[in-house]
Image (cartoon, rainbow, N blue to C red):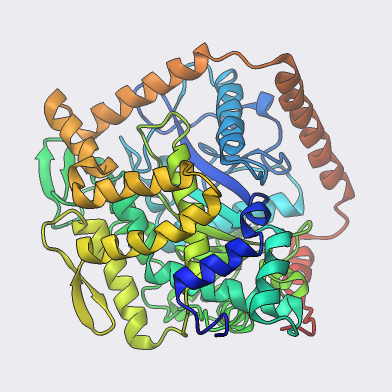
Amino acid sequence: MTFLAASLEQRVARLERAGATDALKDNRIGLEKEGLRVSCEGRIAESPHPAALGSALTHPYITTDFSEALLELITPALSAPGAVIDFLQHVHTHVYRHLGDELLWATSMPCVLEGGARIPLAYYGSSNAATMKTAYRRGLGNRYGRTMQVIAGVHFNFSFADAFWALYQDRLSPDEDSARFNAESQMGMIRNLQRLGWLVPYLFGASPAVCASFVQGQETDLDRFDATTLYYPYATSLRMGDIGYQNKQEEGTGMKASYDSLDAYVRSLTWAIETPCPQYESIGVKIGDRYEQLNANVLQIENEYYSTVRPKQITQWMEKPTVALRRRGIGYVELRSLDVNLFEPVGVGLEQLYFLETLMLHCLLQESPRIGSRERRDIDENEVLTAHRGREPGLKLARDRSAVQLKVWAEEVLGDMQAVAALLDGASEGPYLDSLRQQLEKVRDPDMTPSAMMLSEMRERGEGFFAMARRRSCEHREHFKRQVLDAAVVEDFDRWARVSVERQREIERADDQPFDDFLQAYFAQSERPAFL
């Protein structure tokens, strides 16, 4: 029997006999965790990025996202999940040494919003690269509103060990070009991650409620929890639902990336960043000396396409993401659907990492046909249904042109994942199987999900969303204030800050062309290797 014809359990058994458990130990995980700087009163900070943290343009681990107030804390890609969490703990502790009275907001959804005009755009200095980054963010604000851009999340970046890829290809397609095999296998994994994407907000969604200030008087069908809080009774992740940025950016543009292959994905994004969109042309591009957006195309740049999961390659300085994918293939896969977990000081827990690594391998080993238009609609609808009503008793999702209860489907998937978790654990039971059991408990008892626990805590304490989020944010600050970093860790962070500032100055000194010419050269990048 060929490897492809074997069942999932048979595939796992063959990989185990071939030594896959040892090879998989060198898988790499990285995290990007966003956190909004706020005042003690919970309002978005209007202060600049703390100078002691270094340059947001060039620091490897501490930068900003849309807003000057939206910190993004990054870990290196590490093989041990525990080491990833430790690094994230260290960087939070370091940041809190320089925040003064400010807090890092403990949830994905912001509070006490006073209109988009009060949300400061991220500033990266005076270089062309910095100007481009700020202009891109101004364009996002003009297209979708600044309020949507300060929703925070956690990105899970994952890559399989090189030794595992060699072992896996040897059993599946030994004669195929390795770059092509890697690309096609990972695109198949991404398609399966989309099919099962609803699992992530169900298990880890932590935004079932929002401040009334978030909708700013707009009409919604959200229920009122109290005078200051709106929610859905069975919601898991409003961040991933219709009120979040996730499903708004495609309205009126007709944009939907293709995941049929890496080439199809790159071509679909290339079309979007080169095709004018009348909806955005009305905004204008350059008004006076200021860019209101980088261009009036369907997407300004590739990063504007906010899918739940996407193939990525580490980019060189000012290299377009699509060009990086064409030149070097897929370096890692980015899962973007994790809410900030307010029950964890760093916003994400160790058991989440173990489960997501198991999910990645499970989705790689499953067959993955291309996604047709009907299935694409089902995938999108399943995501929104789970975000809005995931804990609703008897909720049904669409699978293979029929309806299936979320609970039944989730139990089936988690049951199939046991063999994969055992492969990752090795000879004895370990953290992968333990994490899988924790997720199964959430499926059987929805009250154990983070979203349910948040609403329960709010009811028990008589708190609205803002009061709970602020209290938890203060508790997290006290947690990090109590931490003591080793002298070597402190020196590392201080050195990275100094080096990043000097690097920013070098970039500014090296600028030798007008911004218009710089932007034209950036978009003119193009290179196509043979394997695509």
Quarter of image, res 275: bottom right
Image quarter (top left, top right, bottom left or bottom right) of the C terminus: bottom right
Total labels drawn: 0
Q: In this view, does 122 lie above or below 54?
A: below
Place of residue 199 in the rendered image (x, y in percent of width and height, measured from the top left): 34, 59
Residue at left 79%, top 79%? 527
Q: Can residue 300 be seen in this view?
A: no
Place of residue 293 in the rendered image (x, y in percent of width and height, measured from the top left): 56, 63
Place of residue 277 in the rendered image (x, y in percent of width and height, measured from the top left): 49, 79
463 displayed left or right of 332:
left
Residue at left 44%, top 15%? 478
Q: In this view, does 91 lie above or below 452?
A: above
Front residue of 308 and 449: 449
502 displayed left or right of 253:
right
Q: Is residue 188 above or below residue 230?
A: below
Image quarter (top left, top right, bottom left or bottom right) of the N terminus: bottom right
Residue at left 73%, top 60%? 163
Front residue of 322 and 399: 399
Q: In this view, does 133 lie above or below 329?
A: above
206 displayed left or right of 508:
left
Residue at left 42%, top 40%? 118
